[in-house]
């Protein structure tokens, strides 16, 4: 499964040091240092924007056309379900309502599948989910409360993935691989599309995997089994649908799949006639602006973050791409230059309304020139001359809210470990604060965070406190490595700084 972590652990990372809440509060009062700016966003603050409202005015047409069909592409006697399924931010499904089931129950489904439509060129590029999910939480990918067989089409072949996601957005999975001699890397197994049918089964056994729970995907004679990751079973799931669901991320090319002779938890479905399953968004054509990487963030006359009144900053973020000038973006308050020799403080309210795997949002102090610099490679993720917070994964852990920084090339650090504060893409508002103390850790420098009362502390690595680095903005800035999107808002902010002259 694709990992969400943008900045993998290395010699440059260091585990955070927990500190008592009372110590954080005392340190915060000292660390604020200079004057504080306050923003309630009851009107447009007129912050400095750089590609934050994408210059792209185009949209893409999304077509969804799947459900029951009198065709026989999957090789059944007559009738089947399926059709054209397109990855997009907007959910689309065709599914059988079922009684609520959890990780304590068994789940099993099987049947025939055909990928692509015979004689239809370019129809083998689907990326589609088949399995158990919750209709109330199916809003992004990875999809919470789910156990899936994911069909990843590659033209004349497709790859067969098994994946799940707990109620806390913590995911796991794998892909069926070729059998190779021990010790050799195993490439993905390729199953033919266009006119070829396959037998498949998806099974969750709550007693398997040494009691952790085990999911097995079988396609023809090939098989992969995965155990639930530690702690994921305690998160639990609640599924109430079985069927077809699109991958909910930035719009991408669609493709057709066809299913027949299904068995769902022991109940057979031959589809000789329309079964009357539930369809939502499955027969429609519309325009979408959720196109990677179309940035759409800044001032908004909304109240998602739970501020005192209407008005906030945020919106739709994608990871940036420093190889192209218009693929990095920022939106921030213009400040007189600050540096790392003085304390820095920021606090406010934050909400994560939507989060897709392989996505990151950065907020904090940055430099209007250095942080938006164009490079010829994506050798690092954090922009230079940045100190603040990141919202990201890895996918096996959902989303964290943690401190990070990048002073000069090669000098960067970020919080690690499972004790980092967690944030969920559930629309719930949270309070947070961040304090940078240049005298912390014996002068090495320390960043302290409090998130909904949970304290977390991270020292800078030796030599990374650079007094020559300057910050002249506070707000949002994108990463330097591209990826998927989040929807985030901030309100009721306080932060160190004087307005630029």
Image (cartoon, grey):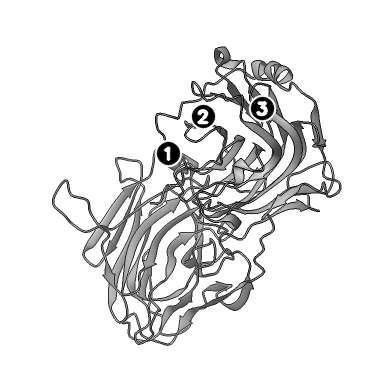
Name the residue beneath numbered marker 2: 419
Q: Residue at x 56, y 73 (%)?
A: 279
- In the depicted structure, whether residue 59 falls above or below residue 2: below
Q: Which residue is mark 1?
A: 8
Quarter of the image where one finds residue 256: bottom left
> Does residue 321 appear in this view?
yes
Q: Cα distance, mark 3 to mark 1?
A: 27 Å
User: CA–CA distance between discs 1 and 2?
Assistant: 17 Å
Residue located beneath label 3 in the image: 339
Which mark lies nearer to you, 3 or 2? 3
- Residue at the location (36% across, 45% down)? 213
| Circles 1 and 2: CB atoms closer than 8 Å | no
In the picture shown, does residue 131 fall above or below 437? below
Secondary structure beneath label 2: loop
Residue 457: x and y, percent? 57, 24
Residue lying at 43% horizontally and 37% vertically, measured from the top left: 231
| Quadrant for the C terminus in the image | top right
Q: Secondary structure at mark 3?
A: strand
Residue furthest to the top: 442
């Amino acid at each position: 499964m694709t990992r969400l972590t943008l900045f993998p652990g290395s010699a440059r990372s260091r585990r955070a040091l927990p500190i008592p809440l009372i110590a954080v509060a005392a340190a915060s009062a000292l660390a604020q240092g200079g004057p504080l700016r306050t923003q309630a966003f009851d009107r447009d603050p007129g912050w400095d924007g750089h590609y934050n409202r994408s210059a792209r005015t185009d949209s893409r047409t999304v077509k969804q056309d799947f459900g029951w069909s009198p065709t026989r592409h999957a090789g059944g006697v007559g009738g089947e379900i399926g059709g054209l399924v397109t990855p997009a931010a907007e959910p689309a499904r065709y599914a059988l309502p079922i009684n609520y089931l959890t990780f304590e129950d068994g789940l099993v489904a099987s049947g025939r599948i055909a990928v692509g439509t015979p004689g239809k060129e370019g129809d083998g590029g689907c990326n589609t989910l088949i399995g158990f999910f919750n209709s109330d939480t199916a809003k992004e990918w990875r999809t919470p409360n789910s156990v899936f067989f994911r069909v990843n089409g590659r033209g004349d072949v497709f790859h067969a993935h098994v994946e799940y996601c707990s109620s806390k957005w913590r995911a796991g999975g794998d892909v069926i691989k070729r059998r190779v001699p021990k010790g050799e890397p195993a490439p993905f197994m390729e199953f033919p599309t266009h006119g070829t049918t396959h037998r498949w089964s998806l099974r969750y056994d709550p007693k398997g995997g040494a009691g952790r729970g085990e999911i097995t995907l079988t396609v023809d004679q090939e098989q992969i089994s995965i155990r639930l990751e530690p702690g994921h079973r305690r998160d639990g799931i609640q599924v109430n649908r079985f069927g077809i669901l699109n991958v909910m991320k930035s719009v991408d090319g669609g493709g057709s799949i066809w299913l027949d002779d299904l068995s769902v938890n022991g109940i057979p479905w031959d589809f000789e006639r329309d079964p009357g399953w539930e369809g939502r968004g499955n027969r429609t054509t519309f325009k979408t602006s959720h196109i990677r990487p179309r940035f759409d963030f800044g001032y908004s006359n909304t109240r998602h973050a739970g501020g005192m009144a209407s008005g906030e900053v945020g919106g739709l973020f994608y990871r940036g791409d420093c190889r192209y000038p218009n693929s990095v973006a920022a939106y921030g308050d213009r400040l007189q230059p600050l540096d790392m020799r003085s304390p820095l403080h920021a606090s406010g309210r934050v909400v994560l309304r939507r989060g897709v795997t392989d996505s990151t949002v950065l907020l904090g102090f940055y430099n209007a020139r250095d942080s938006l610099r164009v490079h010829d490679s994506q050798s690092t993720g954090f922009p230079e001359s940045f100190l603040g917070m990141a919202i990201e994964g890895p996918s096996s852990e959902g989303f964290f809210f943690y401190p990070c920084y990048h002073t000069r090339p090669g000098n960067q650090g970020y919080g690690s470990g499972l004790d980092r504060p967690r944030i969920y893409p559930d629309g719930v508002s949270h309070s947070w604060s961040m304090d940078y103390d240049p005298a912390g850790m014996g002068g090495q420098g320390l960043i302290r965070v409090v998130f909904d009362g949970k304290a977390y502390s991270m020292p800078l690595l030796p030599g990374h406190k650079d007094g020559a680095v300057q910050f002249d903005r506070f707000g949002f800035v994108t990463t330097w490595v591209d990826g998927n999107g989040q929807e985030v808002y901030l309100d009721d902010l306080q932060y160190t700084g004087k307005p630029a002259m």
